[in-house]
């Protein structure tokens, strides 16, 4: 036995004790030599989600990362060389917003760098600082603050993950903004560019006016907003009118057409004619398009550039002009569209220029009322409006020059390939595949990857300036692979020097950065060191598992599948495990934006990591789980289980054991035969990524083992020197050895503690139990343990009914059982007499199992 049995086993302190030991011993270190020697098929590699390093982790992270860790531990015990890295997603908008709040600064790229800059605020969230009061700093100063804060956040995250017991190899870590990640992200982009998969275009772009950045389709969120339909009259050449209804009258100067459904009889006579816009007098065509909805509003729509994504479709498919009037700041631009002419029209425009869209709306309504073209009263409605998922103001659509990567929206061959790989991927649960397929089939445009932000991976390009100083966007200057990573805003391209920046005949650098998903979509390449370590890359890619949340199938899973398809023409993983959501006591999804998240540190400290892991592992993949921090029932059950594992282990190991003892008694063999079935079922469940089922059946057996079998045989186990005692102790130890390993992936601390009392090595590097280890139980009949448990329960109930303690001696007891069960019960009669303190036990045939008579021994007075 490695360590002496403790006087009183406790859970407290096990996280620190074993976390230190595991780190010192390298228990979870990736064995590169073994991976290379044995080959890719011997490796189980995990494309671990890199958590966003901004702020704090919440209970949902603990939930999903525990699911991954259970699988990692199981695969390690199966004998696979497990590659389990950890990344930190530390670039993008969340980090920038946190830095602004934390330090009280905002980025102004026009400002010079200030060495040794000291921010005005340091600590807390700084949310009381108004945006106008934030101190402007240079881009380089801002990025330095981003890096400083994310490093501190990452330290806290790692400490929490270690407390939780994640079996991550911490030597295999990366940051999505470190030099390797910058290089790989830029290299992959340039490969996309060379193959024609990346391109730049001036096009309508979803735009967040708060963050001043473009937003991709995958980052959209619909929010119900109050609005009002305004009925407006357009003037026909014959003096008549066509009335439309719109919720955005402020876009009237941007109107380029009216559109109705081709089958709508009300408007068929007007197709091919023109009307004039009220107030501004611009002539626009009346056209037909199948997306027009006859039952929406007036049945005919005003097409503006651009009010919503349908406007974009109409603009593109009907080849309409672009008269964008909303600027990147969310205000009406200064210059009127060229088609707005005439004194009154320009006067109306002047009244709008510079206003926010809200103020412009009120102004246009007043103009329409004055011209007599506003019909009736506004009709209030509530409708869904597009928001950036991290924003708090409705998105606008502005025309900007952006970078895109082809994603199958306009490439049927690529779409078919993505769908094919989706079908090849093993989804857990399987129904999640439909969400992926729906997303791929529903894509309406290529992936917009450029962002007008600061803390991100720079798009690695420059553009030449012609002799007039105009930018030549069609001929970007591309760096060589060995020059990566580069920052075009501060580095000069080969063949130029810094003095030529911004002057005729010189160059300008691309100032945009990549969408954070453009880097996160490369996590297999980042973790597997795709471009610098071919030996490691070949050992781990394609990865075995992509674990993640169900809500980012459309972003992270799809984008990673896309990048792998474009670069390698293969799917990046064999399996995808999708965790469900955490629901608060009101059954609402927990999220930071809703303010209902729970941070896990206090729960872990109060109840212990094994207890929290038990709660997480009790939920199947794809299934939502409730969590009430005031009454975490499932966590408490997990703590009780972990304590019972320690106490039962100590009790079993306290019995003297003979090294050569064998299991001979029928009930001992029956117990092991039952356990043999549990091993088979739990192994099958885990192989199918159903950790909850494996835990459920193991735990159910464990409580039967403790409450019935252990109680039944303990008197025999104390009787040292008898054959029955040797059989009982041998069976108990074999069962304990097996059960600890079955529980180890879920409850790593308590099982490691108990294992250390009689083993020299870690349980987490021990082999997963197999039915072959329990071959001795082939002669056992599982029915005997079930029957014995029922008989024992009946004896206990009889004492309870007699209002007697379970320790009360019984002078005589009679048990009746069906004919086929009598012989089985006779085989355990001695154990039943001992556990029930029965002096004389009669077992006879009867219609059903029942204690028919109990005579308590007279008590002494």
Image: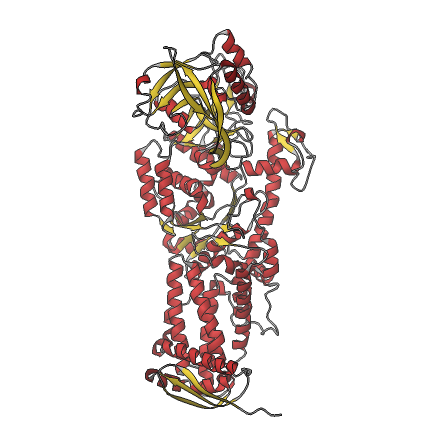
Q: Name the side, left or right, on which 95 lies relative to 531.
A: right
Please tell me in which quadrant of the rendered image residue 9 appears.
bottom right
- The quarter in which the C terminus is drawn is bottom right
Q: Nearer the viewer, residue 360 or 135?
A: 360
Q: Name the side, left or right, on which 619 lies relative to 290.
A: right
Residue 655, horizontal then vertical, whole percent = 52, 80
| Residue at 52% over, 19% down | 364
The answer to whether residue 659 is seen in the rendering is no
Q: Nearer the viewer, residue 42 or 274?
A: 274
- The quarter in which the N terminus is drawn is bottom right
Q: In the rendered image of this protein, does residue 688 appear above or below residue 465?
A: below
Q: Nearer the viewer, residue 483 or 342?
A: 342
In this view, the residue farthest toward the top is 343
| Residue at 45% over, 48% down | 548
Q: In the rendered image of this protein, does residue 691 appear above or below residue 671?
A: above
Residue 56, horizontal then vertical, whole percent = 59, 46
Residue 806, horizontal then vertical, whole percent = 53, 82
Q: Nearer the viewer, residue 703 or 385?
A: 385
Please tell me in which quadrant of the rendered image residue 730 appears.
bottom left
Residue 691, horizontal then vertical, whole percent = 43, 59
The answer to whether residue 734 is seen in the rendering is yes
Q: In the rendered image of this protein, does residue 189 appear above or below residue 732?
A: above
Across the whole image, how many numbered discs are drawn on residues? 0
How are the residues colored?
A: secondary structure
């Amino acid at each position: 036995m490695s360590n002496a049995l403790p006087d009183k086993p406790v859970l407290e302190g096990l996280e620190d004790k074993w976390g230190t030991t595991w780190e010192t011993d390298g228990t979870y270190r990736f064995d590169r030599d073994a991976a290379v020697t044995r080959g890719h098929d011997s490796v189980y590699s995990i494309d671990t989600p890199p958590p966003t390093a901004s702020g704090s982790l919440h209970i949902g992270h603990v939930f999903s990362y525990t699911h991954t860790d259970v699988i990692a531990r199981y695969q390690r015990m199966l004998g696979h060389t497990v590659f389990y890295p950890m990344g930190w997603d530390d670039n993008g908008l969340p980090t920038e917003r946190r830095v602004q709040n934390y330090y009280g600064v905002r980025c102004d790229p026009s400002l010079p760098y200030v060495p040794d800059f000291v921010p005005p605020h340091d600590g807390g969230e700084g949310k009381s600082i108004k945006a106008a009061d934030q101190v402007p700093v240079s881009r380089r100063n801002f990025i330095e603050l981003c890096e400083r804060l994310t490093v501190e956040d990452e330290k806290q995250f790692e400490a929490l993950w270690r407390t939780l017991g994640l079996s991550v190899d911490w030597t295999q870590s990366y940051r999505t903004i470190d030099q390797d990640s910058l290089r790989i992200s830029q290299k992959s982009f340039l490969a996309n560019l060379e193959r024609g998969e990346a391109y730049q275009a001036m096009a309508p772009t979803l735009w967040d006016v708060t963050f001043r950045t473009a937003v991709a389709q995958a980052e959209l969120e619909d929010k119900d907003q109050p609005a009002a339909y305004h009925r407006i009259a357009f003037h026909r050449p014959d003096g008549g009118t066509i009335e439309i209804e719109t919720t955005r009258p402020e876009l009237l100067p941007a109107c380029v057409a009216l559109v109705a459904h081709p089958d709508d009889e009300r408007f068929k006579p007007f197709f091919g004619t023109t009307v004039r816009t009220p107030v501004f007098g611009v002539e626009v065509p009346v056209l037909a398009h199948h997306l027009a909805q006859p039952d929406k509003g007036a049945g005919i729509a005003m097409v503006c550039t651009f009010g919503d994504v349908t406007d974009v479709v109409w603009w593109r498919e009907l080849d309409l002009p672009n008269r964008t009037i909303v600027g990147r700041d969310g205000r009406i631009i200064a210059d009127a569209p060229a088609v707005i002419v005439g004194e009154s029209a320009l006067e109306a425009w002047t009244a709008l220029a510079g206003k926010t869209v809200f103020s412009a709306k009120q102004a246009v309504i007043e103009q329409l009322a004055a011209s007599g073209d506003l019909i009736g009263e506004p009709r209030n409605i509530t409708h869904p409006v597009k928001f950036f998922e991290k924003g708090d103001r409705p998105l606008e659509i502005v025309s900007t020059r952006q970078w895109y990567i082809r994603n199958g929206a306009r490439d049927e061959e690529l779409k078919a390939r993505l769908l094919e790989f989706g079908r090849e991927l093993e989804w857990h649960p399987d129904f999640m595949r439909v969400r992926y397929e729906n997303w791929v089939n529903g894509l309406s445009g290529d992936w917009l990857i450029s962002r007008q932000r600061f803390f991100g991976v720079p798009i690695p390009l420059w553009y030449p300036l012609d002799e007039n100083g105009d930018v030549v966007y069609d001929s970007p200057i591309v760096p060589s692979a060995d020059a990566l990573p580069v920052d075009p805003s501060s580095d000069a391209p080969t063949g130029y020097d810094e003095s030529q920046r911004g002057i005729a005949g010189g160059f300008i650098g691309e100032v945009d950065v990549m969408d954070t998903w453009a880097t996160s979509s490369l996590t297999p390449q980042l973790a597997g060191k795709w471009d610098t370590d071919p030996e490691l890359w070949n050992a781990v890619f394609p990865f075995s598992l992509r674990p993640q949340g169900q809500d980012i199938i459309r972003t992270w899973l799809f984008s990673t599948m896309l990048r792998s398809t474009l670069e390698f023409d293969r799917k990046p993983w064999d399996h995808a495990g999708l965790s469900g959501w955490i629901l608060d006591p009101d059954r609402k999804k927990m999220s930071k934006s809703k303010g209902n998240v729970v941070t896990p540190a206090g729960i872990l400290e109060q109840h212990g990591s094994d207890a929290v892991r038990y709660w997480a592992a009790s939920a199947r993949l794809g299934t939502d789980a409730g969590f009430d921090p005031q009454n975490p029932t499932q966590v408490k059950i997990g703590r009780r289980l972990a304590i019972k594992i320690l106490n039962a282990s100590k009790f079993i190991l306290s019995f003297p054991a003979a090294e050569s003892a064998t299991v001979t008694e029928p009930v001992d063999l029956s117990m092991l035969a039952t356990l043999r079935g549990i091993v088979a079922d739990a192994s099958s469940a885990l192989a199918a990524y159903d950790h909850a089922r494996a835990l459920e059946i193991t735990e159910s057996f464990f409580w039967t083992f403790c409450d019935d079998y252990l109680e039944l045989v303990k008197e025999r186990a104390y009787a040292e020197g008898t054959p029955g005692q040797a059989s009982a102790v041998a069976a108990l130890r074999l069962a304990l050895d097996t059960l600890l390993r079955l529980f180890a992936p879920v409850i790593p601390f308590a099982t490691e503690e108990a294992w250390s009392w009689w083993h020299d090595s870690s349980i987490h590097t021990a082999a997963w139990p197999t039915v072959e280890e329990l071959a001795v139980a082939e002669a056992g009949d599982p029915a005997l343990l079930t029957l014995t448990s029922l008989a024992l329960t009946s004896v206990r109930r009889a004492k309870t009914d007699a209002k007697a303690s379970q320790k009360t001696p019984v002078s005589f007891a009679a048990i009746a059982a069906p004919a086929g069960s009598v012989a089985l019960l006779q085989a355990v009669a001695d154990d039943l007499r001992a556990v029930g303190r029965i002096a004389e036990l009669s077992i006879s045939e009867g219609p059903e199992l029942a204690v028919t008579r109990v005579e308590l021994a007279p008590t002494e007075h």
